Image (cartoon, grey):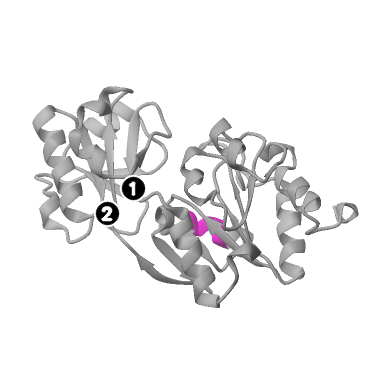
Amino acid sequence: MKYIFFDIDGTLKAGGYDNEYIPASTKRAIELLRSDGHFLAIATGRSEAMAHKFLRELEFENMVSDGGYGITIAGELLEIEPLDRERALALVDECEAKGFIWAIQVDNSDTRVAPDGRFEEFTHDVYMRTRIVDGLNPRNYNNIYKVYIACLAPDEQQLESLKHLPWCRFLDEYIFVEPADKAHGIRRILDHFGADYSDAIVFGDGINDLSMFVDDWTKVAMGNACPELKAKADLVTTDVDKDGIWNACVDLGLINAEKL
C-alpha cells in the first residue's frame, strides 16, 4: 500500500478559481487507486473548510490542510494549529503603522474578516469571502490562522515582521501569510499509521509544494509546475489538464494504462 498525497490547485484541479474542475482521467485514476487499497489524502494550503468540498467530490477521508497544520483522518478534523499569535499581531500592527491593507482569518471557514472595505476594493478577490467587522481588533481572538495583506510586489518587503512568518504570493493583489510546511502534516499522518516514509508519494505544482518535496518519499511534479518544484521532483508528469495524474500513476506502476 502506498500513501498518496495530492495538492489541489493545479494538481487535482484544473482551471481558475471561477472555472475549476477535476479532469475525468484524474477521477478515474483516484477510483483505481482506491480500489487497489492505497491510502489517499489531500495536501493543501487551503483551510479545511475551503478544501472540504474536494473531499466530498473525490470521496477522500484524509487531508493535510492549512499548509500542513490541519489534520483530517477518516473524515474527522483532529486539529488545526494557528499562526504564532504574537508574531501575527506584530505583523498587523506594522501594517497599521505603515498603511498596508490587511485582513485575518480567525476560524475554520471560507470567510476572512477585515476592519473596512478596502481589502475587497483593492483585490476584487473571488477566492474567499471578506466580512467587514467594525472596530476589528485582532487581539480579541485567541487564534489567527492566516493574515492577508493587500499589496503589489515588491511592496511587502517593507514589512520587517513578515520575515518571521511563512508567506507566499499566489495572486498579484495580495499575499497569504499562513503555515507552509506540508511535510509536517504528511509526517504526522504517516506516524499515526506507523507507515514508512518511503511508502509515501506526493503530487504538487506550486511554490508552496516545495515544503513537501523532501527526500523522505517520492515526489511528482505536474507538467504545469513551477521550475523550482520540477528541479526537486523524482518524476515530472504532464499538465493537470493533460492527464497528468493519470500518466504519473501509470509511470509509477500504480495503475494499468489500459483501464482508462
Query: The disc labelled 2 sits on which kind of residue?
Result: Leu
Residue at x-position 50% and y-position 75%: 192
Tell which of 62 and 135 is nearer to you.
Answer: 62
Residue at x-position 41% and y-position 31%: 171
Query: The disc labelled 1 sits on which kind of residue?
Result: Glu
How packed mark 2 is, by other alpha carbons closer than 10 Å (few <14, some 14-19, many 20 or more), is many
Quarter-wise, where is residue 41 in the image? Answer: bottom right
Residue at x-position 68% and y-position 36%: 239
Q: Quadrant of the N terminus?
A: bottom right
Asked whether residue 70 is drawn in magenta, I would say no
Q: Position of residue 155 (x, y in %)?
A: 26, 23
Find the distance from the CA under tag 2 to the CA under tag 1.
7 Å
In the visual, does 69 lie left or right of 32?
A: left
Q: Position of residue 115 (x, y in %)?
A: 16, 41
Q: Are marks 2 and 1 in contact (CB under 8 Å)?
A: yes
Instruction: Identify residue for label 1.
Output: 178
**217, above or below 12, in the image:** below
Task: Tell me the SS state at disc 2.
Answer: loop
Tell which of 42 and 191 is nearer to you.
Answer: 191
How packed mark 1 is, by other alpha carbons closer than 10 Å (few <14, some 14-19, many 20 or more), is many
The circle on residue 83 is 2
Which residue is the extreme one toward the right? 258
Question: Magenta residues, as a range?
Answer: 51-55
**220, above or below 80, in the image:** above
Principal SS element in the magenta part? helix
Q: Position of residue 118 (x, y in %)?
A: 22, 30
The circle on residue 227 is none
